[in-house]
Amino acid sequence: MRGDAANLDDLDRLFDTVKREKGKIDVLYASAGTGEAVPLGKITEQHFDATFGVNTRGTLFTVQKALPLFNDGGSIFMTGSVASVKGFPGYGAYSASKAALRSFARTWLNELKGRNIRVNVLSPGPIATPMQDQVPTEEGKRMFESLIPRGKMGRPEEIAAVALFLASDDSSFVNGVELSVDGGFSAI
Protein backbone atom coordinates (compact mmCIF):
# COMPACT_ATOMS: atom_id res chain seq x y z
CA MET A 1 0.00 0.00 0.00
CA ARG A 2 1.47 3.37 -1.02
CA GLY A 3 1.36 6.29 1.34
CA ASP A 4 3.22 9.19 2.86
CA ALA A 5 4.44 8.60 6.41
CA ALA A 6 4.07 12.32 7.09
CA ASN A 7 0.38 12.24 6.08
CA LEU A 8 -1.81 11.15 9.01
CA ASP A 9 -4.72 10.24 6.71
CA ASP A 10 -2.44 7.86 4.79
CA LEU A 11 -1.34 6.29 8.09
CA ASP A 12 -4.99 5.86 9.15
CA ARG A 13 -5.75 4.08 5.85
CA LEU A 14 -2.69 1.87 6.30
CA PHE A 15 -3.57 0.75 9.81
CA ASP A 16 -7.26 0.36 8.98
CA THR A 17 -6.17 -2.04 6.24
CA VAL A 18 -3.78 -3.86 8.60
CA LYS A 19 -6.54 -4.21 11.20
CA ARG A 20 -9.03 -5.50 8.63
CA GLU A 21 -6.64 -7.92 6.89
CA LYS A 22 -4.29 -9.06 9.69
CA GLY A 23 -5.83 -7.93 12.97
CA LYS A 24 -2.65 -7.46 15.00
CA ILE A 25 1.00 -6.45 14.60
CA ASP A 26 4.05 -8.22 16.05
CA VAL A 27 6.78 -6.21 14.30
CA LEU A 28 6.90 -2.66 13.01
CA TYR A 29 9.85 -1.39 10.98
CA ALA A 30 9.38 2.37 10.55
CA SER A 31 11.80 3.09 7.74
CA ALA A 32 10.74 6.37 6.14
CA GLY A 33 13.48 8.79 5.30
CA THR A 34 14.46 11.70 3.12
CA GLY A 35 17.36 14.07 3.06
CA GLU A 36 19.35 16.41 0.89
CA ALA A 37 22.46 18.49 1.43
CA VAL A 38 21.61 22.03 2.49
CA PRO A 39 24.30 23.85 4.50
CA LEU A 40 23.63 26.04 7.50
CA GLY A 41 22.74 29.51 6.27
CA LYS A 42 20.74 28.13 3.35
CA ILE A 43 18.24 25.93 5.21
CA THR A 44 14.68 27.01 4.50
CA GLU A 45 11.54 26.37 6.49
CA GLN A 46 10.35 24.14 3.65
CA HIS A 47 13.54 22.04 3.75
CA PHE A 48 13.40 21.71 7.53
CA ASP A 49 9.69 20.89 7.57
CA ALA A 50 10.00 18.32 4.77
CA THR A 51 12.96 16.59 6.42
CA PHE A 52 11.50 16.49 9.93
CA GLY A 53 8.01 15.83 8.53
CA VAL A 54 8.98 12.48 7.06
CA ASN A 55 11.94 11.39 9.19
CA THR A 56 10.75 12.40 12.65
CA ARG A 57 7.06 13.30 12.59
CA GLY A 58 6.22 10.48 10.19
CA THR A 59 8.06 7.94 12.33
CA LEU A 60 6.40 9.12 15.55
CA PHE A 61 2.88 8.97 14.14
CA THR A 62 3.51 5.66 12.37
CA VAL A 63 4.45 4.07 15.69
CA GLN A 64 1.69 5.82 17.62
CA LYS A 65 -1.02 4.79 15.17
CA ALA A 66 0.27 1.20 15.16
CA LEU A 67 0.18 0.82 18.96
CA PRO A 68 -3.51 -0.11 19.31
CA LEU A 69 -2.87 -3.07 17.00
CA PHE A 70 0.43 -4.10 18.59
CA ASN A 71 0.78 -7.41 20.40
CA ASP A 72 2.59 -7.39 23.72
CA GLY A 73 6.13 -8.70 23.39
CA GLY A 74 6.61 -7.30 19.91
CA SER A 75 9.42 -5.36 18.30
CA ILE A 76 9.48 -1.82 16.95
CA PHE A 77 12.54 -0.53 15.17
CA MET A 78 13.24 2.52 13.10
CA THR A 79 15.76 3.45 10.42
CA GLY A 80 18.22 5.97 11.78
CA SER A 81 21.46 6.91 10.10
CA VAL A 82 25.12 7.04 11.05
CA ALA A 83 24.90 10.62 9.77
CA SER A 84 23.39 11.43 13.18
CA VAL A 85 26.80 10.85 14.79
CA LYS A 86 29.22 11.82 11.99
CA GLY A 87 28.45 15.53 11.42
CA PHE A 88 28.49 15.63 7.61
CA PRO A 89 28.55 19.21 6.29
CA GLY A 90 25.24 20.16 4.70
CA TYR A 91 23.26 17.43 6.44
CA GLY A 92 22.47 19.15 9.75
CA ALA A 93 18.68 18.94 9.41
CA TYR A 94 18.80 15.34 8.19
CA SER A 95 21.23 14.28 10.92
CA ALA A 96 19.16 15.94 13.65
CA SER A 97 15.95 14.34 12.37
CA LYS A 98 17.59 10.92 12.59
CA ALA A 99 19.18 11.63 15.99
CA ALA A 100 15.67 12.24 17.34
CA LEU A 101 14.84 8.58 16.66
CA ARG A 102 17.43 7.47 19.20
CA SER A 103 15.64 9.58 21.80
CA PHE A 104 12.29 8.15 20.74
CA ALA A 105 13.62 4.59 21.20
CA ARG A 106 14.86 5.25 24.71
CA THR A 107 11.71 7.05 25.78
CA TRP A 108 9.29 4.62 24.16
CA LEU A 109 10.96 1.51 25.59
CA ASN A 110 10.31 3.02 29.01
CA GLU A 111 6.72 3.85 28.12
CA LEU A 112 6.11 0.40 26.62
CA LYS A 113 8.00 -1.76 29.12
CA GLY A 114 4.73 -2.89 30.73
CA ARG A 115 3.82 -4.43 27.38
CA ASN A 116 7.30 -5.92 26.86
CA ILE A 117 7.64 -4.19 23.49
CA ARG A 118 11.24 -3.69 22.36
CA VAL A 119 12.20 -0.42 20.62
CA ASN A 120 15.47 -0.01 18.72
CA VAL A 121 17.10 1.99 15.93
CA LEU A 122 18.89 0.39 12.98
CA SER A 123 21.37 2.96 11.61
CA PRO A 124 22.88 2.13 8.23
CA GLY A 125 26.05 3.60 6.88
CA PRO A 126 26.79 3.94 3.16
CA ILE A 127 24.81 1.24 1.35
CA ALA A 128 25.04 0.48 -2.38
CA THR A 129 21.50 1.44 -3.42
CA PRO A 130 20.04 3.54 -6.24
CA MET A 131 20.12 6.44 -3.77
CA GLN A 132 23.91 6.24 -3.77
CA ASP A 133 23.79 6.94 -7.51
CA GLN A 134 22.98 10.51 -6.48
CA VAL A 135 26.55 10.89 -5.19
CA PRO A 136 27.80 13.22 -7.90
CA THR A 137 31.08 11.59 -8.91
CA GLU A 138 32.97 8.33 -8.84
CA GLU A 139 35.56 10.22 -6.78
CA GLY A 140 32.83 10.98 -4.19
CA LYS A 141 31.87 7.30 -4.05
CA ARG A 142 35.51 6.26 -3.62
CA MET A 143 35.87 8.82 -0.81
CA PHE A 144 32.94 7.23 1.05
CA GLU A 145 34.36 3.74 0.53
CA SER A 146 37.77 4.87 1.82
CA LEU A 147 36.10 5.75 5.15
CA ILE A 148 34.69 2.24 5.59
CA PRO A 149 37.25 -0.11 7.18
CA ARG A 150 36.44 -2.98 4.78
CA GLY A 151 36.82 -0.60 1.82
CA LYS A 152 33.44 -1.09 0.18
CA MET A 153 29.86 -0.05 0.74
CA GLY A 154 27.33 -2.26 2.42
CA ARG A 155 24.68 -4.20 0.55
CA PRO A 156 20.91 -3.97 1.12
CA GLU A 157 20.95 -7.66 2.10
CA GLU A 158 23.23 -6.84 5.03
CA ILE A 159 20.70 -4.31 6.34
CA ALA A 160 17.89 -6.82 5.79
CA ALA A 161 19.71 -9.45 7.85
CA VAL A 162 19.97 -7.07 10.81
CA ALA A 163 16.32 -6.05 10.39
CA LEU A 164 15.32 -9.72 10.55
CA PHE A 165 17.38 -10.11 13.72
CA LEU A 166 15.65 -7.12 15.37
CA ALA A 167 12.27 -8.49 14.30
CA SER A 168 12.97 -11.94 15.73
CA ASP A 169 12.95 -13.36 19.23
CA ASP A 170 16.74 -13.75 18.85
CA SER A 171 16.93 -10.06 19.80
CA SER A 172 14.73 -10.45 22.89
CA PHE A 173 17.35 -8.83 25.14
CA VAL A 174 18.17 -5.98 22.73
CA ASN A 175 16.24 -2.88 23.75
CA GLY A 176 16.81 0.84 23.39
CA VAL A 177 19.93 0.59 21.26
CA GLU A 178 21.03 2.33 18.14
CA LEU A 179 22.67 -0.45 16.14
CA SER A 180 25.09 0.92 13.55
CA VAL A 181 25.24 -1.33 10.50
CA ASP A 182 28.00 0.44 8.67
CA GLY A 183 31.10 -1.74 8.43
CA GLY A 184 32.77 0.34 11.15
CA PHE A 185 32.20 3.67 9.34
CA SER A 186 30.89 5.45 12.45
CA ALA A 187 33.50 3.93 14.77
CA ILE A 188 36.50 5.65 13.21
Image: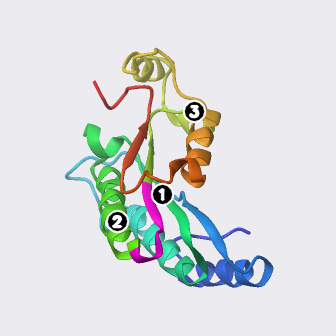
80, above or below 51, in the image: above
Q: Which residue lies furthest to the left in this view?
A: 41
Q: Residue furthest right?
A: 21
Q: What residue type is labelled 3?
A: Asp
Q: Is residue 89 visible?
A: no
Relative side of 113 to 27, left or right: left
Q: Is residue 40 magenta?
A: no
Relative side of 75 to 14, left or right: left
Q: What stretch is highlighted in magenta?
A: 114-120
The quadrant in which the C terminus is found is top left
Q: Is there a contact, CB below 8 Å, between mark 3 and mark 1?
A: no
Circle 3 residues within 10 Å: few <14, some 14–19, many ≥20: few
Relative side of 134 to 49, left or right: right
Residue 89: image quadrant is: top left
Q: Nearer the viewer, residue 41 or 90?
A: 90
Helix, strand or loop at mark 1: strand
Q: Residue 123 location in percent, x, y?
A: 43, 44
Q: Which amino acid does label 1 sit on?
A: Met
Q: What residue type is labelled 2?
A: Phe
Label 3 vs label 1, nearer the camera: 1
Q: Is there a contact, CB below 8 Å, between mark 2 and mark 1?
A: yes
Residue on which the image places disc 3 = 133
Please tell me which of labels 2 and 1 falls first in the chain: 1
**Measured Cα–Cα span from mark 2 to mark 1:** 10 Å
Please tell me which of labels 2 and 3 falls first in the chain: 2
Circle 1 residues within 10 Å: few <14, some 14–19, many ≥20: many
Residue on which the image places disc 2 = 104
Q: Residue 142 location in percent, x, y?
A: 45, 17
Q: Does the magenta stretch include residue 116?
A: yes
Residue on which the image places disc 1 = 78
Q: Which of 54 and 108 is in front in this view?
A: 108
Q: Residue at x 77, y 84 (%)?
A: 20
